Image: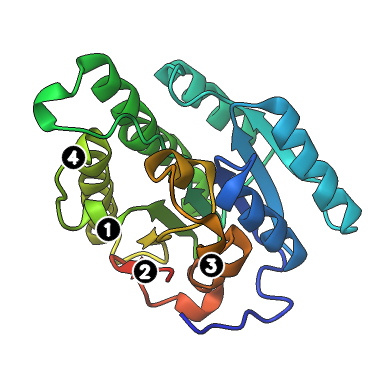
Amino acid sequence: MDYIAPTNLLDNKTILITGAGDGIGKALAIKCADLGAKVILLGRTLSKLAAVADHITQLNKQTAMIIELDLNDATEERYITFAQQLTEQQVTLDGLVHNASQLGKLGPFIDIDYDTWIEVMQTNVNAGFLITKHLLPLLQAGTNASTIFTTSSVGHKGRAFWGTYSVSKFATEGMMQLLADEYADTTMRFNAVNPGGTRTSMRASAYPDEDVNRLKTPEEILETYLYLLGDDSLEVTGQRFNAQ
């Protein structure tokens, strides 16, 4: 997408990003802060989240909030607790980006082990469900709230040997479409973005022999996310976008 975000695109908006400690989540969090947003960083590694928060502070922007949460291990009670904490702090959400994902193991369907299936579904599907469910009141209280799910080319058309990851992204797209339809008569919107091949650790796990210099960096693929988080996309919901 050829989109140039105005410098005040996200002024007075509060945006929560999962997997905000590195990769696309980190790049997006810093860019959102640079465009005026108050950012809530959610991830499992406190040191990485703190480093992103420090970077944001150095931009002379609003202090980022940190939520340390391992999506693979968290029970529903943990999601309820952090949603209640945000409510008690009178936080309302104008944006929610489900960026965190787990690749699992690539290989034949018959070789998928159940533990891997559960782990990938827990991070890629169950966490998205629980976060969205328990943060919906905060999104409803926000202004034209935008929720972005992360999908993949293998979540739109099945591809051999992509196993649980592929199935999880089909589920993700289905969840996005369901929410967009249920809340079609509200100011909330729900969309999905396929980042494409990007210079991240997950990509390296899937393609260990790939020349990373041929891939775009996370900072180079943010235009679609920014478009969907800002008010230029107020009428857009239930859609799937390719960032590249």
- Is there a contact, CB below 8 Å, between mark 1 and mark 2? yes
Q: Which mark is residue 242?
A: 2
Q: Is residue 194 above or below residue 74?
A: below
Quadrant in the picture for residue 67: top right
Residue 25 location, x and y as percent?
58, 49
Label 3 to label 1: alpha-carbon separation: 15 Å
- Is there a contact, CB below 8 Å, between mark 4 and mark 3? no
Mark 1 residue type? Ser
Residue 186 location, x and y as percent?
36, 64
Residue 228 location, x and y as percent?
48, 69
Residue for badge 1: 153
Label 2 to label 3: alpha-carbon separation: 10 Å
How many neighbours does mark 3 have within 10 angstroms: few (below 14), some (14-19), or many (20 or more)? many
Mark 3 residue type? Ile
Label 1 to label 2: alpha-carbon separation: 9 Å
Label 1 residue SS: helix
Q: Which mark is residue 221?
A: 3
> Image point 30% across, 58% down: which residue?
183
N-terminal label among 4 and 1: 1
How many neighbours does mark 2 have within 10 angstroms: few (below 14), some (14-19), or many (20 or more)? some
Mark 4 residue type? Phe
